[in-house]
Amino acid sequence: MGYAQLVIGPAGSGKSTYCSSLYQHCESMRRTVHIVNLDPAAESFDYPVAMDIRELISLDDVMEELGLGPNGALIYCMEHLEENLDDWLADELENYLDDDYLVFDCPGQIELFTHVPVLRNFVDHLKRKNFNVCVVYLLDSQFMTDVTKYISGCMASLSAMVQLELPHVNILSKMDLVTNKKDLEDYLNPEARILLSELNQHMAPQFAKLNKALAGLVDDFSMVNFVPLDLRKESSIQYVLSYIDNCIQYGEDADVKVKDFDPPEDD
């Protein structure tokens, strides 16, 4: 059985930085992870790339040959990937053993993980190849300064949950840039009563029923909470990694390894 993280989130949320920091952290632990680039518009990386979608198709080529804009060209590239799951991706996955750990660095266009079926079909292919997959959804903590932006982030996260139907870990990225971390504490494990009160304070009275419905949605399902990530702290990276490992049951079926010691010498 293989293991995989699908790293998604809005553009600029720190997905590639997360992948780079995760790789460096695992390298220091002598643990092997393989980072896969699924962004056909990527230009450079701070980590070794195990697989690269640009070997199959690149955004610049599509824009030049088909005359599409950036967003249209990206959708075209991802649909081309979807058409080649049984060819290109299957061949690439053959290079990895059953217990390998892959981290897929995805593009940031929100439609890819909310309503376009490309990533859903990609995930289904991984599961058929006997991979345990977890979604890692990154949201920039800099945008969590008020309740309205928080609700927007929650709704985007819920859309990805519904679309992908996978174990799902929400991460507040860039915590090292937050000056007052106490301002974010209420948003890590939200309470409907507090959310509703703040929404009503920030929005016009005609939105009161909508605010109640949104706060109730977050509270009823109890599916949205966030794990803070400060990349300056190795302990924070390790906590997030352990949290994700638990979701995909990484290491649970590993054999216990006993280190051999020389017997003590007789005096």
Image: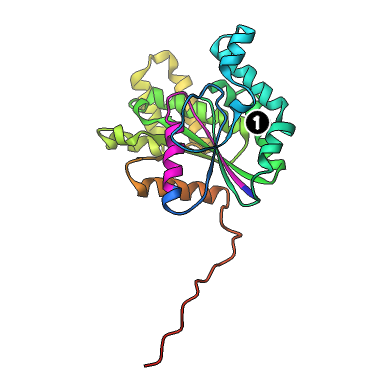
Residue situated furthest right in the rendering? 86
- The image shows residue 101, relative to residue 63, as above or below, that is below
Q: Give residue 59's quadrant in the image.
A: top right
Q: Amino acid at mark 1?
A: Arg
On the question of residue 256 being in view, the answer is yes
Please give the name of the residue rendered at 37% of the width and 46% of the height, measured from the top-left corner. 236
Residue 113 magenta-highlighted = no
Horizontal side of 265 relative to 134 (left or right) equals left
Of 113 and 64, the residue lying toward us = 64
- Of the 4 image quadrants, the one containing the C terminus is bottom left
Task: Find disc 1 in the rendering and name its residue.
Answer: 120
- x, y percentage for residue 113? 58, 27
Of 263 and 109, the residue lying toward us = 263
- x, y percentage for residue 43? 48, 24
Please give the name of the residue rendered at 59% of the width and 9% of the height, measured from the top-left corner. 64
- The image shows residue 102, relative to residue 262, as above or below, that is above
Please give the name of the residue rendered at 53% of the width and 21% of the height, measured from the top-left corner. 41
Residue situated furthest bottom in the rendering? 267
Residue 8 magenta-highlighted = yes
- x, y percentage for residue 181? 28, 37
User: Is disc 1 placed on a helix, strand or loop?
Assistant: helix
Please give the name of the residue rendered at 59% of the width and 20% of the height, measured from the top-left corner. 58
Q: Which residues are magenta?
A: 3-25
